[in-house]
Image (tube, grey):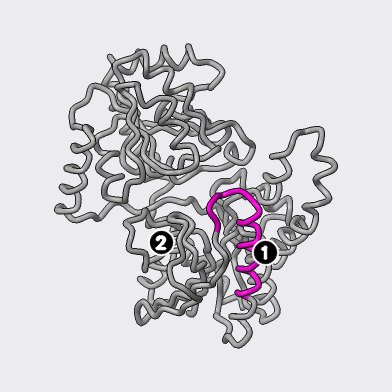
């Protein structure tokens, strides 16, 4: 079976930086393990480093079973702004040019968003009668509209109607929808305007257990110690991710500043300078910048709780992010301000603590209890791993997805 995967904003097998694998890498590896040939279509611009991988569009034959097609575009410095919009339009135009003389695959997976690129890809596949699944991870364009003040949204909405049309057409043309949670899947099906079918599937964005070499693990642990993150701290809470507007750190920092707790924040992004300027004088709050996969695993191992300090938005309330999976896969409790699906999982399975940014005293009280109750932390950790194995195990998730693609291909 010849499979195409479109995922434009993720790490790829060719990237030298030691990133956590996401959908493109995980799915392609599993398909190859099952004997299928894979082509990944992605952007030549690396979303994480904000640099181009090569000077022009490029085709890389990574192995006998894996080819990577890189589409050139402008690039951008920020996740938001006109330059990123231009980049996505240019990416779609260049993809259309590259597809002109291509032989179609047997089946495909289309990563959504970006909207324009996804629309071009879906249209090309549909015209050639290639069945595909659309993998929806964000509520574009709805989240654009809701970023504006409530009073202005009725006037802004018509501007985004073409994008709404593209999104619904992609859903309609797809053989099935993949989504990170049932709530997200239901929203997609509602937008499609039809009932759920056998190819619609909740497909968590989970990752495999770490397979780092012991030398790399040791080097990562040594690196942590150069940043004064030692093993055996009384209580350490850690966050790993891009520091952007999606997170609210003030509530948790104010709480830990009053307690014998160490808070480690790892990652780059537009908020890093602001956070450092405001909180770098606090001795128990450490900003260590971007870290690679081995360093991230070492930090998780030396942490007692993993932090999910999301702002309350409808998009995140419906979603389960990779940070949640990384925590429970590693048997770590979760400290989360996220609502919706994640809040329910934490409460139902007793895998951590929910908190509200507008109730700082409740957070302070719960943290004080955890400082002296290591048994509860151990129970949260055991429950986390149990939930991962029962509901989000990497092999089960991706083997099911491979079978789904095989069934969709057979239907063709």
Q: Nearer the viewer, residue 237 or 317?
A: 237
Residue 383 in view of the camera: no
Q: Nearer the viewer, residue 195 or 222?
A: 222
* Dot 2: element: helix
The relative height of residue 147 versus residue 127 in the rendered view (above or below) is above
Say which residue appears at 56% left-offset and 32% top-offset: 311
- Magenta span main SS: helix
Q: Compare marks 2 and 1 and give the one earlier in the sequence.
A: 2
* Dot 1: element: helix
Q: Is residue 266 magenta?
A: no
Q: Provide residue 148's location: percent of width, then percent of height.
A: 73, 38
The relative height of residue 21 versus residue 306 in the rendered view (above or below) is below
Left or right, residue 259 beside residue 11? left
Left or right, residue 218 beside residue 383? left
Number of other residues with Cα within 10 Å of mark 2, as a class: few under 14, some 14 to 19, many 20 or more: many
Q: Please state the total of marks drawn on the protein image.
A: 2
Residue 266 in view of the camera: yes
Instruction: Tell me the number on the disc at residue 116.
Output: 1
2 or 1: mark nearer the eye: 1
Say which residue appears at 26% left-offset and 21% top-offset: 374
In the image, the segment drawn in magenta is 76-95
Q: Residue furthest front?
A: 277
Say which residue appears at 80% left-offset and 54% top-offset: 161
Q: Provide residue 1's location: percent of width, then percent of height.
A: 48, 79
Q: Quadrant of residue 151 in the image?
A: top right
Q: Quadrant of the C terminus?
A: bottom right
Q: Provide residue 141's location: percent of width, then percent of height.
A: 70, 51
Q: Quadrant of residue 110 in the image?
A: bottom right
Residue identified by numbered label 2: 26
Say which residue appears at 21% left-offset and 32% top-offset: 228
Number of other residues with Cα within 10 Å of mark 1, as a class: few under 14, some 14 to 19, many 20 or more: many
């Amino acid at each position: 079976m010849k499979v195409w995967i479109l995922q434009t904003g993720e790490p790829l097998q060719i990237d030298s930086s030691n990133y956590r694998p996401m959908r493109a890498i995980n799915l392609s590896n599993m398909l190859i393990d099952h004997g299928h040939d894979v082509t990944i279509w992605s952007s030549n611009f690396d979303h994480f480093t904000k640099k181009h991988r090569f000077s022009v569009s490029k085709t890389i034959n990574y192995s006998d079973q894996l080819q990577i097609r890189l589409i050139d575009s402008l690039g951008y410095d920020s996740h938001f702004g006109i330059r990123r919009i231009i980049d996505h339009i240019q990416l779609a135009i260049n993809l259309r040019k590259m597809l002109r003389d291509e032989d179609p695959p047997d089946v495909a997976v289309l990563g959504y968003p970006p909207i324009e690129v996804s629309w071009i890809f879906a249209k090309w596949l549909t015209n050639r009668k290639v069945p595909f699944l659309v993998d929806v991870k964000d509520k574009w364009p709805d989240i654009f509209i809701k970023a504006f003040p409530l009073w202005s949204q009725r006037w802004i909405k018509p501007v985004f109607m073409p994008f709404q049309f593209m999104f619904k057409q992609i859903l309609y043309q797809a053989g099935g929808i993949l989504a990170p949670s049932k709530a997200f899947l239901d929203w997609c099906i509602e937008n499609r305007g039809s009932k759920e079918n056998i190819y619609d599937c909740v497909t968590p964005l989970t990752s495999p257990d770490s397979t780092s070499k012991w030398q790399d693990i040791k080097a990562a642990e040594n690196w942590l110690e150069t940043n004064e993150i030692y093993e055996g701290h009384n209580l350490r809470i850690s966050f790993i991710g891009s520091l952007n507007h999606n997170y609210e750190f003030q509530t948790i920092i104010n709480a830990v500043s009053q307690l014998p707790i160490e808070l480690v924040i790892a990652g780059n992004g537009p908020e890093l300078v602001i956070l450092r300027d405001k909180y770098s004088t606090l001795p128990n709050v450490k900003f260590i910048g971007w870290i690679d996969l081995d360093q991230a695993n070492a930090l998780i191992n030396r942490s007692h709780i993993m932090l999910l300090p999301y702002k309350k938005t409808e998009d995140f309330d419906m979603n389960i992010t990779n940070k949640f999976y990384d925590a429970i896969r590693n048997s770590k409790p979760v400290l989360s301000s996220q609502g919706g699906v994640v809040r329910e999982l934490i409460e139902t399975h007793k895998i951590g603590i929910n908190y509200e940014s507008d109730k700082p005293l409740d957070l302070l009280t719960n943290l004080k209890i955890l400082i002296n109750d290591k048994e509860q932390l151990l129970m949260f950790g055991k429950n986390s791993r149990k939930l991962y194995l029962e509901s989000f195990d990497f092999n089960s998730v991706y083997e099911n997805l491979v079978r789904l693609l095989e069934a969709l291909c057979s239907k063709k």
